[in-house]
Amino acid sequence: MAKKKYIETPEKLMQIFNEYREHTKANPRYRYQLCQRSGEMVKEPLEVPLTMEGFEIYSYEIHHASLDHYFKNTDNSYTDYLPVCTHIKKMIRDDQIKGGMVGQYNPSITQRLNGLTEKQQIDTDGKIEVVFVKGKTIL
């Protein structure tokens, strides 16, 4: 017997994601900074980035639905959900990358989360170059 799906349709999954997105963007986190002029602590709102973990937590706490099976397509039982799952992942990644690019979110963390780190490869082909400087040999 097939297991009951808590999220009945792909459209319902997208609806839950849209609720999560609206909730996340409407509930900023705050940073407190000392105002140099008045000497008072000032509360600065910070936009919260979308994350897959945040979406999973929201879905479980609000709708009592775990998302693992939908995104992993366990036993190929969730194939109808794959286009929506892919779209959701891309929307989350897009929010993080754009936020990092404009300095809204920490660019370094954004790069690491999305595999965007800059890589350099230096090949020496096993050769050692010897340089002579004022009577000294430098390897």
Image: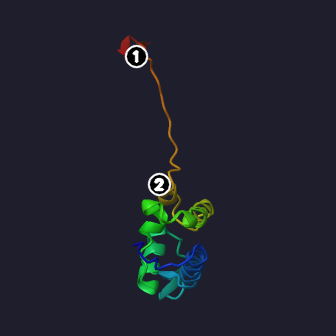
Q: Which mark is residue 126?
A: 1
Mark 2: amino acid: Arg
Q: In the rendered image, which quarter is residue 83 located in?
A: bottom right
**CA distance for labels 1 and 2:** 31 Å
Closer-to-camera residue (81/92): 81
Closer-to-camera residue (25/103): 25
Left or right, 3 with reference to 88 = left
Closer-to-camera residue (135/132): 132
Mark 1: amino acid: Gly
Q: Classify mark 2: helix, strand or loop.
A: helix
Q: Identify the image quadrant of the N terminus.
A: bottom left
Q: Residue tagged by mark 2? A: 112
Left or right, 90 with reference to 122 = right
Say above or below: 86 vs 121: below
Q: Position of residue 55 (x, y in %)?
A: 48, 74
At a point 50% along the width and 48% down the height, the residue shown is: 117
Marker count (numbered) = 2
